[in-house]
Amino acid sequence: MAQFQEVSKLSSQHPKPPGLVLQYGTAGFRSNAKHLDHAMFRTGLLATLRSKKTKATIGVMVTASHNPEEDNGVKLIDPMGNMVTAEWEGYATQLVNAEQDDLLIVLKDIIEKETVNMSQEANVFVGKDTRYIMLTNLLFVNIYSLHYMVCCQNTQGKYGEPTVEGYYRKLCQAFIQLIKNASNCTDDQKHLSVDGANGIGALKLHEMESHVKSELQISVFNDGSKGKLNYECGADFVKMQQKPPTGMEMSPGERCCSYDGDADRIVYYYTDSEGQFHLLDGDKIATLISTFLKELLTQVGLDLKIAVVQTAYANGSSTRYLEDTMKVIVRCTKTGVKHLHHAAQEFDIGVYFEANGHGTVLFSEVAEEKIQLLTQDPNTNDERKRAAQLLQNTINVINQTVGDAISDMLLIEAILAIKGMTVQQWDAIYTDLPNRQLKVKVADRRVIDTTDAERRAVSPAGLQEAIDSLVKKYKLARSFVRPSGTEDVVRVYAEAETQESADALAHEVSLAVYRLAGGVGDEPKPL
Ligand code: G16
């Protein structure tokens, strides 16, 4: 077939480096950009098959998000704006790792297994962040909210208008409606400093600013005009280092936030009058949002099941607060938005956030219908109607296809304003247990296998036993290890009663990983 001959010819222009094996990981393929040319080309091929198969628009997002500038990555987005299914992730891995001569065999195999109608038209949206792209034969649409746009396109506009402008309009209108419920906001409360991680979020914030200017004045730092992407700035840096990004002007007590390179994560922070840094991460965001929603549900008198979905990285204090004080259902899943999203879909309202600031809120169709009916019901009293309208505007301000920093930020800002809450009061809802995250280099991170939502290691032999006995040495301690799905490292997490204990535990567990899982380079040093 001419189509296959063409594929064969073009693919030879994007050869696979011999021996290179890539895995479709936590968020697609990620590696040093110079290893990814063939992966980009082949993911494009798979996207067209997925589009033909689903008879819908598919998204291809070219980004390595929080990774350093020299890395790149690519992931597929399904028709409703969420991540592609596990089965197609498997096809992606097969296709990207096929040797040049086998490429057509693998491709035909997928077509046959999935009974793809090759005469069906394909439609693919392509998005990218600000990274340098080496592909020249693809037309890139410089869009940020690819997940949202794919979903809009496939719901014939029901979810919104599939344009960047339409996206801002929807979000900002809902934000303005929400903020009308806030009284006596001071100029200080209306101001927010944002670290754009020198990535795409800063550019998009500038475009959006005019829509919300009357209610929110934003100062953008690390806007890409001089600094390097994610370098000593951005949500990942701030969360991991537990300190402010460079390039940010902060006054004591001032509310600030950081996005990551592709603006799908957000964390908040401030420094107090003693200069101490306070981080409000994804766990604190989930708590703020779920408290707000739970109060509104009580006011409207709707019996909707609300849950918070976290991962093993969630601070122990947050889980305890949510379960014991707020009495909400808490679920723990493996790392990766796709897992949290899936778990959140099981509830009427699913609030999901990774501690690193990745997350959103999902409303079931039933929940949306009940809320909308209440806003229109002439017999609803004013208090219930106001609460129903707040819920309705929350649905409109949040990006339900996948978390994104701008949409999350607008909801958080609205909640703080409505509740008349300062960032310090928000921070005081519960106190985080001191914690530490480290990375260990090993020869092959796949030797580590985990279970129980990544909270326990089943291989290599002896590792979990070693972690268990180290954890016993410290009060309120917890630790786990897992292979990263986006970087070539093993991640180590530890929390304990004091920062010294958390640091010591993280170091000791890192040593255990290094010794039992084939560490390379120098042994981890104490902090
Ligand atoms: C991606 C995923 C996140 C995950 C993070 C780290 O984030 O989308 O769900 O938490 O990688 O994953 P890992 O620990 O497996 O490396 P981003 O912001 O880089 O897309």
Image (tube, grey):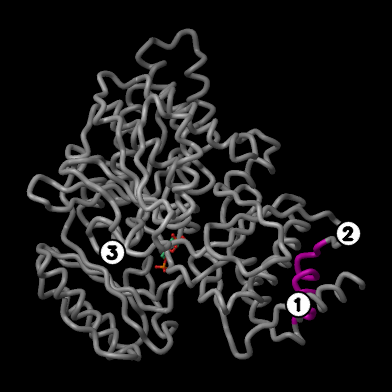
Residue 11 got which mark? 1
In the shown orientation, is residue 473 left or right of residue 131? left
Q: Amino acid at mark 2?
A: Ser
Q: Main secondary structure of the magenta part?
A: helix
Q: Amino acid at mark 3?
A: Met
Mark 2 and mark 1: Cα distance apart in space: 21 Å
Q: Residue furthest left?
A: 274
On screen, residue 350 above or below 20? above
Mark 3 and mark 1: Cα distance apart in space: 39 Å
Q: Which residue is identified by label 2?
A: 119
Disc 2 residue: CB within 8 Å of ligand 1: no
Verify whether residue 390 appears in magenta: no
Whichever of labels 3 and 1 marks the residue nearer the N terminus, that label is 1
Where in the figure is residue 459, as x and y percent of width and height? 37, 84
Image point (34%, 40%), residue name:
219
Residue depth check, mark 3 versus mark 2: number of the one nearer the observer: 3
Report which quarter residue 244 is drawn in: bottom left
Mark 3 and mark 2: Cα distance apart in space: 49 Å
Q: Secondary structure at mark 1?
A: helix
Image point (41%, 51%), residue name:
223
Residue 240 got which mark? 3
Image-quarter location of ligand 1: bottom left
Residue neighbourhood size for the residue with mark 3, other residues' Cα within 10 Å, grouped as few (<14), some (14–19), many (≥20): few
Whichever of labels 3 and 2 marks the residue nearer the N terminus, that label is 2
Q: Secondary structure at mark 2?
A: loop
Numbered range of the magenta stretch: 103-116
